[in-house]
Amino acid sequence: MQTFLNQLERVLGGSGLLTGEQVRGRASSWLDSSPNQALAIMRPESTEELSAALKVCNQHKVSVVAMGGLTGLVNGAIASTSEVGLSLERMNKIVELDPIQKTAVVEAGVALQVLHEAASVHDCHFAVDLGARGSATIGGMISTNAGGTEVLRFGMMREQVLGLEVVLADGRVMSSMRPLLKNNTGYDLKQLFIGAEGTLGIVTKAMVRLRPRPLTHCCALLAVESFEEVLQLLAFLQQRAGLSLGTFEVMWQSFYDHVLANNKAHKAPFAQSPAFTVIVECTGTNIEADQDSFEAMLGEAFEQGLCIDAVLASTLDQQGAIWAIRDDIETLMSALPNGIMFDVSLPIKHIDSYVEQLKQTLVGRWDEAQVITFGHVGDGNIHLAIALGKHLPAARDALEQYVYTPLEGLSGSISAEHGIGLDKKRYLPLNRSSEEIALMKQIKAVLDPNNILNPGKIF
Amino acid sequence: MQTFLNQLERVLGGSGLLTGEQVRGRASSWLDSSPNQALAIMRPESTEELSAALKVCNQHKVSVVAMGGLTGLVNGAIASTSEVGLSLERMNKIVELDPIQKTAVVEAGVALQVLHEAASVHDCHFAVDLGARGSATIGGMISTNAGGTEVLRFGMMREQVLGLEVVLADGRVMSSMRPLLKNNTGYDLKQLFIGAEGTLGIVTKAMVRLRPRPLTHCCALLAVESFEEVLQLLAFLQQRAGLSLGTFEVMWQSFYDHVLANNKAHKAPFAQSPAFTVIVECTGTNIEADQDSFEAMLGEAFEQGLCIDAVLASTLDQQGAIWAIRDDIETLMSALPNGIMFDVSLPIKHIDSYVEQLKQTLVGRWDEAQVITFGHVGDGNIHLAIALGKHLPAARDALEQYVYTPLEGLSGSISAEHGIGLDKKRYLPLNRSSEEIALMKQIKAVLDPNNILNPGKIF
């Protein structure tokens, strides 16, 4: 093993390889602050260094676990004591940003927020956003096909990626870095690496698509009495606002009450907590007219009985206060001892009955069960934070069965945007057929015959 | 061979297998009306029948060439006398259309126009459109990742596909038909089959995404004096119209003059033919205000000198007359004896110089050279119709070298939306590295070990 580490150090340089206390000083993940257990952590400075380092790992058949911003939620970037971690934190440059072509070339270690800021300077917009923007890296977000709050309009990370540079397990570099929206030249191989959670290759660089930066941004919080009306409101807004509708996020009463009760820094937007609180955002380009149209549209929704109250957020501060409630996952989880967060998707018409039945089942089995629901309802994606009092973590397996099993019959998914990692791999057969899983394994074997890239994750 | 055909007929039924004159009575493709040469044409009625038929073909190692609407332009669906054709024309049902979830389940043989009309009934919109809409099938469009005139806003076919049912070479059926925008559960295998030109599996059914149908549709034709101004106009419209900008199509003077001169049915929109004629379309949801905003925006473009003349198309008839010019590929090609159509993409800032240099080179070598240019400039995608007088078809190879070789240095693509087929496969190495092509072949070998699915196409 020492020979192996010496070879790695020769390739990566002294500051390119962390060992011992340098590794232990790092956390395992955002959810788990215990010391990182990896044998070592590689910090290459360039694609060439990574290529050389992966050749060494492949020769020695030592597994490599790519670590992005460590903000993942499914234990997809956990390395054991016999595995080497890989951080691209030194490959963190925005190599190029072309505001005419609306593209950027970004190294994998760039944090989402850094890309947002750079795009903004050129009146451009990178169309994926999520709460972990300060830490989540572009490479990690591509490897997990991250979602977030703009999927309704712009799609997930997959839709933003025009080209990739990837280092394969044996050190070969595969590049498709063309700044083109359209390129039908054979199989679109880059798609394989997007969402593969670091099991097929290491994303080192991406050519991503940018959009024109919107000139107006309207935001409101609506109080809605029933889920049926939530659905009607969504249909109404989609028809009325068309593509300017960017966000349709819903907080169930359980979420709203829990966060407001446990973090007094938030100011209650409504006198009484609504059954459903909806964040609606529209963006546009008409500085004179957009806010008026937005308010008129909400007025009409109110008249049609689709909402019973509304708070307009006209200033950035007011918008910030609304999102602070929605994004306060820290309060949500810290005030829910041993709580587990789930991420599922299903046809939107089934969301309410799924949540209600799940709640009944859990409360029927465990009196102390709490189900707190929120999420990207416009995308059919909800998050469930569930606590079972003293029964967790012991009852975790039983709980997971209750959450995941009904999704099969509803054409839902056990992972909308968080991926599979270690946490969900035993449930993968609920969503993917044996033929599909067999083909995934065949593709893995072609690209990584020694099975050194994040082995044991996904399947 | 007779045993093989008997087995096929047993599986497919009498009307499920065409042979002899029934095959010869069909054309080879849209471009080539000579009799189809296939050994037979399979017309399964169901996925099960196709599965059984492919098993027979795989056992006998007989190649299968999937034929959609035969509107492709790269000879990707040409079958030789020893190959069996496959038409899904009897699998042409829209199985389900859900206007709330905004999804449709469509059999592969459904024509694009049929899906458009069905979606429209439910106030929905299927966001890919192209001139061949009456014949092109959803299955063929998925297998070629079709583009068209709405890519700027909604992306290509790939972006519309939520799930696929695919029959593999050995008859196994692989399905991922979930109506979900978000589903991060392992490798997104369906991406492999999109754009694979029928070489990895046969698409039998798709779950596609629909959009809300826009309520307003504004269209204008603008006369622009230079390509520099075309680019400025595009940037201005993207900033001003944002996501409501759906179409930005450009006809070079060469195209405009040629089509108007050769088809007197068209009425000249401008007194003098402009250097560049741009079709701009915006869609929206504000019936009262959108046309006024559109006209105000164009007025401002005019004041800024970004265009020198404009024709507004307020009625459907007027819009139809504009598109009739742009879509008149029949006149374009029939008045250009032995002309060849090219489909390339490149960064938009290089388009003009690429076209000008190509024209100079060709005219320098062949006096009679004509280069007629038009296309989806908003996507960086242009089409070139090129004639060389008496020198074609003999000089085809030399011409292709002139068209394709400069693209490599410009990060362009030899095929933006038409695919590779037989026509471009020798040029694939200009766009894809040897590592990429090697990986494509490995994936092909995994999915189709006997190499029976459209062999010899792409690579």
Image (tube, coloured by chain):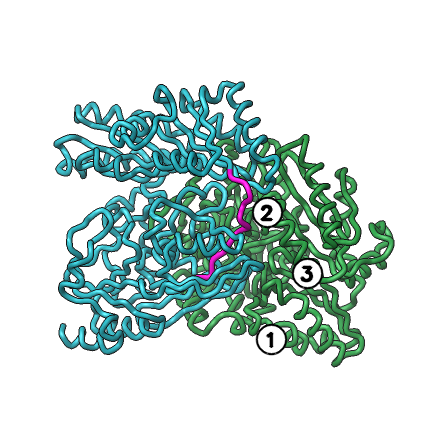
Chain colours: A green, B cyan
Disc nearer the start of the sequence (3/2):
3
Q: Name the chain letter of the residue that bears numbered label 1.
A: A
- Disc 3 and disc 1 on one polypeptide chain: yes
Q: Quadrant of residue A388?
A: bottom right
- Element under disc 2: loop
Disc 3: CA contacts within 10 A as few (<14), some (14-19) or many (>=20): some
Q: Position of residue A199 (x, y in %)?
A: 49, 61
Say left or right for A120 vs B253. right
The residue shown at (75%, 80%) is A364
The amino acid beneath tag 2 is Val
Circle 2 residue: A128
Q: Position of residue A132 (x, y in %)?
A: 67, 51
Circle 3 residue: A35
Quarter of the image for the N terminus of chain B: give it. bottom left
Mark identifier at residue A102: none
Disc 1: CA contacts within 10 A as few (<14), some (14-19) or many (>=20): some
Residue B213 falls within the magenta-colored stretch = yes
Circle 1 residue: A405
Disc nearer the start of the sequence (3/1):
3
Q: Camera-side residue: B341 or B446?
A: B341
Q: Is residue A34 visible?
A: no
Q: Name the chain letter of the residue that bears numbered label 2.
A: A
Q: Real-space Cα distance between discs 1 and 2?
A: 30 Å
Q: Majority secondary structure of the magenta segment?
A: strand
Q: Name the chain letter of the residue that bears numbered label 3.
A: A
